[in-house]
Image: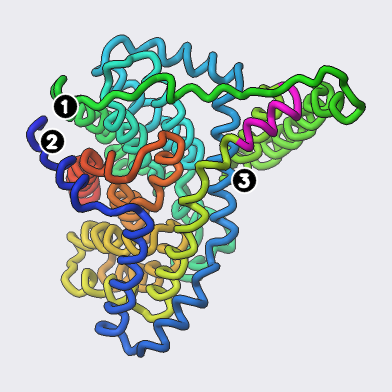
Amino acid sequence: MKVLTRWSNTLMERYLPDPYIFVAILTLVVFLLGLGLTDSGPLDMVVHWGDGFWGLLSFTMQMVIVLVAGHVLASSPVFKKLLSTLAGLAKSPGSAIILVTVVSLIACWINWGFGLVIGALFAKEIARKVKSVDYRLLIASAYSGFIVWHGGLGGSIPLSIATDGHPFEDMMGVVSTSETIFSTYNLVIVGLLFVTVPLLNRFMMPKREDTVTVDTELLNEEIIVEKEEKPTPASRLENSTILSLLIGALGVIYLIQHFVGKGFDLNLNIVNLIFFMLGILFHGTPKRFLAAVANAVKTAGGIIIQFPFYAGIMGMMVASGLAGVMSEWFVNISTETTFPLFTFYAAGLVNFFVPSGGGQWAVQAPIMLDAAQSLGVSYSKTAMAIAWGDAWTNMIQPFWALPALAIAGLRAKDIMGYCVFVLVLSGIVISIGLFFF
């Protein structure tokens, strides 16, 4: 295993470009595929790309806030102490890898946005405690927990089809989460991943001479706030804990009202609001909070620049019909028995170009649900096969790794050598779950 991971890391280091170069090449590949496999001409593909380019603006801002608010919360004294206490449970590099993987799996199963940030923040804190652990593998382990998100409480597809009035209700009705998230096959898949992924990450630990550690001084994010000798009315407000408490109380009251009225609805906006309000409260004063924000926004550049290009790719995939063409390849070779499995593989392929659970469902659902009806396969299992395919290839798709990488201060090529093996293992586990259960 050590030999294989060393080879994989070397390969990624040499050939995997910066995520921006990756998305630029992917844009050109999809453009050419659209020309070759659909009726779209060159100008049509350009128009599809341009029309879609700003399609993820709202989501881009959400992800920037996930990153910034998570950073701000992590740099607060209270949260640092909490993470430090939990990180103290890791006594060796091996236990550090297992602990961060399990914490990330649990957090991502609860909510993907929460898990992405908490996993990376916790990994950084463990790196401070266990100085001999390989930092690349530690962050890869934190990101590997993301594999379970679409089979968990925050899965966008199962939650969508469990809601009255969803776009495909006329075809499949409203599908209870007991048939998706809490179905036997889904729980088997999640359970197996909870056991096997931490063990895999532990087995991938490099030899001592190949271990890449990080200077713990570089992990420290001290928030320095200059004190004024002669306070002014404005500076008193900037250093007022009362103002922070009032704003924080406003947010807390809203959150209580939200959860009382809607149950455990932990969507991305609510996760961001929790991070923001805790950041404001834990930093104590507006001045400390703003200093933490100024420090955090430096890491958001990759998301701001790259997400519009992914939106453009999605625009070409959807408007040209290329995503449908790819899906139909797998439908044409499916039987009643193999259909869920091939739906999973089709979704994994499409996800590489359309890395959005909601967007992918909108593209693939009409084709896959129609095929499921013809073959006599359950709609709920078809939906979950798409959901798992969406989660699966995220392991080698830099789109979702960007927030974790920004928090960790690493490049995609630093962790993808490990993530390839998580992709292989999870693909086997999910295939078993969908085929045999």
Q: Which residues are magenta?
A: 284-294
If you read the primary sequence from the N terminus, does the residue marked by circle 1 or circle 2 appear first? 2
Farthest right residue?
A: 233
Going by the numbered disc 2, the residue's amino acid type is Arg
Residue 270: x, y in percent?
A: 62, 41
Q: Nearer the viewer, mark 1 or mark 3?
A: 1
Residue 329 or residue 51, whichever sits in front: 51
Q: Which residue is mark 2?
A: 6
Q: Decide which of tag 1 and tag 3 comes sooner along the chain.
A: 1
Label 3 residue SS: helix
Give amino acid for label 3: Asn
- The quarter in which the N terminus is drawn is top left
Cβ–Cβ below 8 Å for labels 1 and 3?
A: no
Q: Is residue 165 above or below residue 271?
A: below
Residue 181, image x, y percentages: 41, 44
Identify the image quadrant of residue 293: top right
Q: Label 2 to label 3, Cα distance in Å?
A: 39 Å
Specify few, some or many for label 3: CA neighbours under 10 Å numbering under 14, 14-19, or 20 or more.
some
Percent of width and height locating residue 184: 31, 41
Residue 269: mark? 3
Work out how far the residue at label 1 is from the one at label 2, CA to CA, in angstroms.
8 Å
Amino acid carrying mark 1 in the image = Asp
Between tags 2 and 3, which lies in front? 2
Mark number displayed over residue 230: none
